[in-house]
Amino acid sequence: MNSRSIQRSFKRGGAALFIFVIAWLAALPMRARANPIADWDAIAFAAVEASGKTGPVTACDVAMAHLAIHDALNAIERRYEPYAYNAVAPRGASAEAAVAAAAHGVLIVRIPNQKAALDEALAAALAAIPDGRAKNDGVGAGRMAAAAILARRADDGSDVVRPYKPGAALGVWRPTPPAFAKAAGVSFGKVKPFTMTSGAQFELPRPAYFNIGSAEYAAEYNEAKSLGEANSKTRTAEQSEIARFWYEPSPGVYIRLARDLAVTRKLNLWDSARLFALLHLASADCLIAGYGVKYRYNFWRPVTAIRYGAYDGNPQTAGDPTWNSYLETPSHPEYPSLHAVLCAAWAEILARYFGTDQFSFTMTSARPYPGIKRSFKSFSQAAQESADSRIYAGVHFRSSSRDGLVIGRKIGAQVFEKFLQPTFDSPLRHTVIEDSIAASAVR
């Protein structure tokens, strides 16, 4: 089996998935594993799911695990700048042991009700490494890196839950059908960012469509009403398929793609650790920025807007009190689209990491609508399709998705440009310098 087997097994869900992952690890020698970084990414998400822990705070859990892995490896051999743990491990320390101990050290603290299963995962990983000083030193480096990121994020506000009362005024978000669930992520915009100066660093000007009496609002309203309705006659079969393909929860299409690429591109431990740390740094900050904007503006979703369309004072909007979105509307305010923010950031990082946006790939959807295949010619094309999918699903207005892409690209660019950079002695830095010299010579 390989990392793709773990990904497909996500359909099993919860505890069954975690048991499967642990058994798979226990049966497989360390040297035969496809990519330990991708494997621990799958384990982290399996632990989150099995724990019952929900909401955007889980992005912090996974990001911290990957930062610990990255820092532990770079304590053993400095190839990239560390994030929280700036130290030098004993010479000869086992990189594989450091990876396992770092991930485990974070996850047992952040997801304590999965400690027994995570202990088993750690034991399975360490059992494949010969006993001795190298193994012990690797474990020590991993534990120190985990302790460093846990200490740095100890007072980040991710465990704070603030009271929230939904509004009743026109244009203001309120719980949506069918579940009318309480607001999610209310406090997450106040969490300390990982890479941003503040959650509002990349906030855009107030969108024109927030004026519900305007022509801009009417245009957005009528498009959402037509394309996003449950039984829409204008949404094509392909658009419906796109909506379902991109509807999956965490880890999401791009993170599953990264697991595939780590294996197929044969990335080493250091390069894999950096890639996943960058992606998950962006994930956490995209959610911090996105939820912050959502609750600052608190704008209503299309399903609410259309059901109350007769009362919005706009002569260009016709209300429909029975209107339903094609797919279920998430339980938080409308602007911006978190799908767009996240996918744009991930696309930006992957394009910069692999040196080109023109990258063809095919992915198959996961739950809740598994088995749909979509092919793309670039990372950015996929991000655009993800943004469009939210209009087809009936859960967002157009500007929400458009602005989400802008915000996400800015976050992704900053994460890649300013964090976990190659060190002076890293092979990547030497390649970049040599390419630059060659380009200058040509000019």
Image: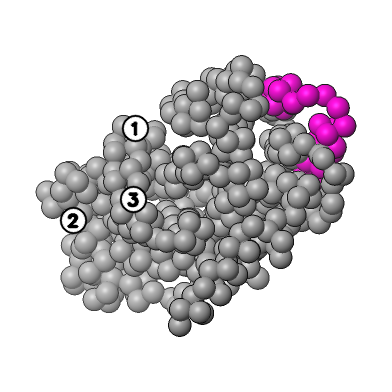
Q: Which residues are magenta?
A: 120-147
Q: What residue lies at 32% left-to-right and 61% top-to-bottom? A: 397
Q: Which residue is mark 1?
A: 370
* Comes first in the chain, label 1 or label 3: 3
Task: Name the secondary structure under disc 2.
Answer: helix
Asked if residue 233 can be seen in this view, the reply is: yes
Residue lying farthest left? 233
Q: Are marks 1 and 3 in contact (CB under 8 Å)?
A: no
Q: Position of residue 323 (x, y in %)?
A: 23, 49
Give the overall secondary structure of the magenta segment. Answer: helix
Q: Is residue 377 above or below residue 3?
A: below
Q: Quadrant of residue 211?
A: bottom left
Q: Say few, some or many: other residues with alpha carbon within 10 Å of mark 1 (under 14 / 14 to 19 / 20 or more).
A: some
Give whichever of discs 3 and 2 has the lower sequence position: 2
Q: Residue at x 46, y 66 (%)?
A: 409
Q: Disc 2 vs disc 1: Cβ atoms closer than 8 Å?
A: no
Give the CA separation, mark 3 to mark 2: 32 Å
The residue mark sitting in front, 2 or 1, is: 1
Which numbered disc covers residue 395? none
